[in-house]
Amino acid sequence: MAASASGRARLFAVLGIVVVPLLFHFFIVETSGAPSLDKLSILSLFRASFVTVAAVTHWIIYGGLFLTFAVTLRPGREALLTFMARKLHGTISEEVRIYTRQVTYAWCAFFATQLLTSIALFVFAPLVVWSFFVNILDIPLVATMFVAEYLFRLHWLRNPPRHSLSAILSMIADVRKAREEWAGSP
């Protein structure tokens, strides 16, 4: 019984991650010919509110991710991905420590690029272009970043740590406990 509930929860999560952004983009595209805000129609007010919430949500997510990763890169701190690698594998080599710190920088650059591109498109491009970037390209870009990091890891590390996807997901699910432990470290 618990397994089927877990399966349903995963299905709803996947649907939410895939379907909701498509619906958001469809709504923005379909209402792009709506009357402008100077006419103050209900549809234009709803659309403006909807777009504002979508934009601010996207910016908060990427800004928060950037800050979460970047704060761990301060001198004397353990990089977030180094901490996660240590939690997953126990003792890690100096090579892995250096690598995970560099990858934390790479993710910071990715998050900053996503955030700045989103803001620039929102301000300077047609709303449909911004929506395509945020709602359609977002997940494929994140997936591409994961794949690129994985391929780079295989190339850069002499003996890259091996782990299963379930081990990674289990560790991520336990992030609150790990976060409390990390917050207590110097």
Image (cartoon, rainbow, N blue to C red):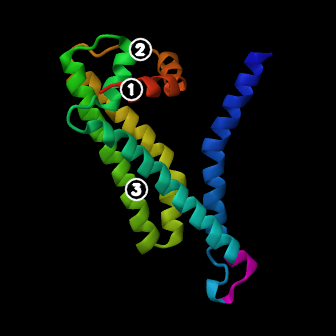
Q: In the shown orientation, is residue 60 left or right of residue 14? A: left
Q: Amino acid at mark 3?
A: Leu
How far is the residue under mark 1 from the one under mark 2?
26 Å
- x and y, in percent, of residue 99 in the image: 23, 27
Residue occupying the point 67% across, 83% down = 35
Residue at horizontal 63%, vertical 89%? 38
Query: Quick one: label 2, few (<14), some, or many (20+) residues within 10 Å?
Result: few
Disc 3 designates what residue? 115
Q: Look at the picture and state if 182 lies above or below 61.
A: above
Judging from the image, what secondary structure is the residue with disc 2 in?
A: loop
Q: Is residue 41 magenta?
A: yes
Q: Is residue 34 left or right of residue 75?
A: right
Question: Could you tell me the amino acid type at mark 1?
Answer: Gly
Q: Can you identify the residue that label 1 sits on? A: 184
Q: Foreground mark, 3 or 1?
A: 1
Magenta residues?
39-44
Can residue 150 be seen in the rendering of this structure?
Answer: no
Neighbourhood count class around disc 3 (C-alpha, 10 Å): few under 14, some 14–19, many 20 upward: many
Q: Classify residue 155 by image quadrant.
A: top left
Q: Amino acid at mark 2?
A: His
Q: Secondary structure at mark 1?
A: helix
- Identified at 39% across, 17% down, the residue is 87
Does the stretch in magenta take in 38?
no
Can you give x and y, in whole percent of width and height, for residue 56 in the image? 52, 60
Q: CA distance from mark 3 to mark 1?
A: 29 Å
Q: Earlier in the sequence, mark 1 or mark 2?
A: 2
Distance from disc 2 to disc 3, alpha carbons, whole Å, reads 30 Å
- Inspect this view and state whether residue 15 appears: yes
Measured from the top left, where is residue 121 in percent x and y? 42, 67
**Res 163 label:** 2
